[in-house]
Amino acid sequence: MSDEEPVDPKKELEEACKPKCVKSLIDYKKCVERIQGDESGHKHCTGQYFDFWGCIDKCVAPKLFVKLK
């Protein structure tokens, strides 16, 4: 066995997929700017955050499972 630590390919694949999800990231950042002054704590950007990471996951999944065989 090798003494090297295994490398998680998911992080690299996520970085490669981020350019494909720019629209979702922009929507999330716009939401964060919009609610920045909210003192009530009722406003949030959870939907936009999950949309962004959902896009990333959708892109990563087929590539990741091929590597995990």
Image (cartoon, rainbow, N blue to C red):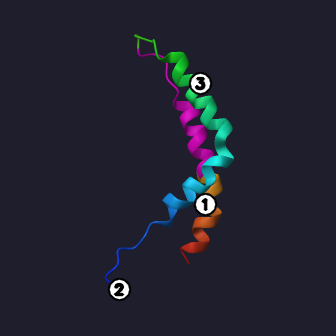
Residue that mark 3 sits on = 30
Placement of 26 over or under 35, stated as above or below = below
SS class, disc 2: loop
Q: Earlier in the sequence, mark 2 or mark 1?
A: 2
Q: Nearer the viewer, mark 2 or mark 1?
A: 2
Q: Earlier in the sequence, mark 3 or mark 1?
A: 3
- Answer with left or right where residue 30 lies relative to residue 5: right
Q: Give the overall secondary structure of the magenta segment.
A: helix
Dot 2 amino acid type: Ser
Give the residue drawn at x 65%, y 47%. 19
For the C terminus, give its image quadrant: bottom right
Measure the alpha-carbon separation of dots 2 and 1.
27 Å
SS class, disc 1: helix
The label on residue 18 is none
Determine the residue located farthest toward the left in the rendered image. Answer: 3
Q: Which residues are magenta?
A: 41-56
Give the residue drawn at x 41%, y 16%. 41
Residue 67, magenta (yes or no): no
For the N terminus, give its image quadrant: bottom left
- Answer with left or right where residue 38 lies relative to residue 33: left
Please tell me how crowded label 1 is: few (under 14), some (14-19), or many (20+) other residues with Cα within 10 Å: few
Placement of 40 over or under 66, stated as above or below = above
Q: Quadrant of residue 67?
A: bottom right
Residue that mark 2 sits on = 2
The label on residue 61 is 1
Dot 3 amino acid type: Lys
Q: Residue 43's spot in the image, x, y percent?
A: 49, 18
Please tell me how crowded label 3 is: few (under 14), some (14-19), or many (20+) other residues with Cα within 10 Å: few
SS class, disc 3: helix
- Answer with left or right where residue 1 lies relative to residue 56: left
